Amino acid sequence: MAFPDKPVAQLLGANGPIHTVAYSASPGTYILTGGADRSIRLYNPAPTTAVHPAPSYITVRQQQQQQQQQDPGPQHAGGGAEAPVPAGRLIQTFSAHGYEVLSLAVAADNARFVSAGGDRAAFLWDVASGTTLRRFGGGGAGTGHASRINAVAFAGEGDSLVATGGFDTTVRVWDTRGGGAGRPVAVLSGAGDSVTAVAVRGAEVVAGSVDGRVRSYDVRMGRVTTDVVGASVTSLCLARDGKSALVGSLDSKVRLMDRETGACLRTYAEPAWRNAELRIQSVLGGGERFVVAGDELTAAGGGSATGGVGVAAEGRIWAWDLLSGKLVARVRVPWGPGGSDGRKRVVGRDGKEKERKNVVSCIAWKEDGYGDQFCAGGTSGVVTVFGSG
């Protein structure tokens, strides 16, 4: 099966970097995005009649040859065809956050979702009305996280619980039905630094931390198991059978870990790929055939023959075969729709214009429904949806 590297839609409208993306539950028709502009947007990636030319997806042959010499490996230039990329449909915008949105999770019934970020609180939303049903934390000492929340996940029967992981080194569990009198029903401690990723399977809450550990909390048994990764954990994705976990870390490696023994089953890395400073997400995709990750580095010049200040540098997505560890795709992600580069300027604190780099930091794979599809967002504020065409 070929990796789905063709851009099929772009999700526009955000006023700043995108920090998190999530597909709706089965059949995965919609996409939620959250970012620096404090808003959450709901899109249908199925195209409208609005179409954006996509010359920025096309790599100049000379540049492509130079890039291949410097950075060998499978090359995908976002589909490699000069077809225009349609815009997805913005369905609704949700506004309640006072700070950036860093994490999203969608309930299995698609009627609710939860969001969290710099507010120190998590928000439970009703999709139909566009309003918040509950707010978890943010009410002062003893009621919630002491700092920003980095990750959220639904838990419990009927998604009756929400787990949040924060900068304050704790994972907190909340009752979505109103239990706990505004306080968490459980506080899971033990992390030595910020909790950056949370995943849930049954009675287990799994958390990755900057201290380089992955902790599995068995809530029913009151037991915690710790696996040592070493480098700070930036991303965590459980396999469907729960026996392994994909762990991204700040040593520019993604590891497939055996959850029973703690052993590293396989490592995914490339000399030209970097994850050493930022929170870059990695996920399992394609029915767990692929390991897909963003990249701190960008393709210099953004497809321009001259490059330089004022030219947006394209982001990159990497994909490896899960079993063999072999690189199967490297996809370039442009700053935005064709012709948009000249309309946006990035100015530093010194007042000078700076190079725009589309660092791809968040990825979500469409797990259900027809066809292989995933979406990716980052510093450009545009979410690009990729499919098989």
Image (spheres, rainbow, N blue to C red):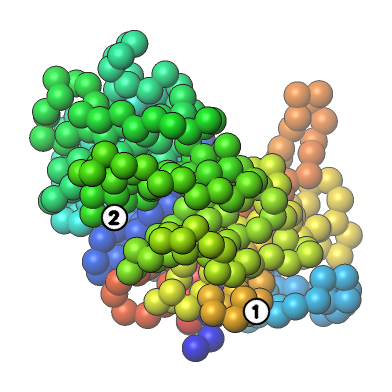
- Most extreme residue toward the bottom, as rendered? 1
Question: Disc 2 on helix, strand or loop?
Answer: strand
Q: Does 361 appear above or below 332?
A: above
> Which numbered tag is attached to residue 234?
none
Name the kind of residue labelled 1 in the image: Lys
Say which quarter of the image contains residue 298: bottom right
| Residue at x-position 75% and y-position 30% | 348
- What residue is at 57 percent from the left and 38 percent from the top? 210
Q: Nearer the viewer, residue 72 or 301?
A: 72
Answer above or below: position of 326 versus 303: below
Q: Quadrant of residue 69?
A: bottom right
The residue wearing badge 1 is 326
Q: Which mark is nearer the camera, 2 or 1?
A: 2
- Residue 185 appears anywhere in the view: yes
Q: Indicate the secondary structure of the residue bearing disc 1.
A: loop
Residue at the limit of the structure toward the top, as seen here: 141
The answer to which quarter of the image holds residue 350 is top right
Residue nearest the observer in this picture, 14 or 366: 366
Residue at 78%, 52% (x, y): give it: 311
**Distance from label 2 to label 1 (Cα)?**
28 Å
Q: Is residue 218 left or right of residue 268?
A: left
* Direction from residue 156 to residue 329 in the image, left or right: right
* Residue 241 position in % (x across, y down): 33, 69
- The crowd level at tag 2 (other Cα within 10 Å; few <14, some 14-19, many 20+) is some
Looking at the picture, tell me which residue is in the foreground, 308 or 24.
24
Q: Which residue is mark 2?
A: 201
Q: Position of residue 352 (x, y in %)?
A: 82, 30
Residue 149, horizontal then vertical, whole percent: 42, 31
Residue drawn at x 16%, y 36% is 176
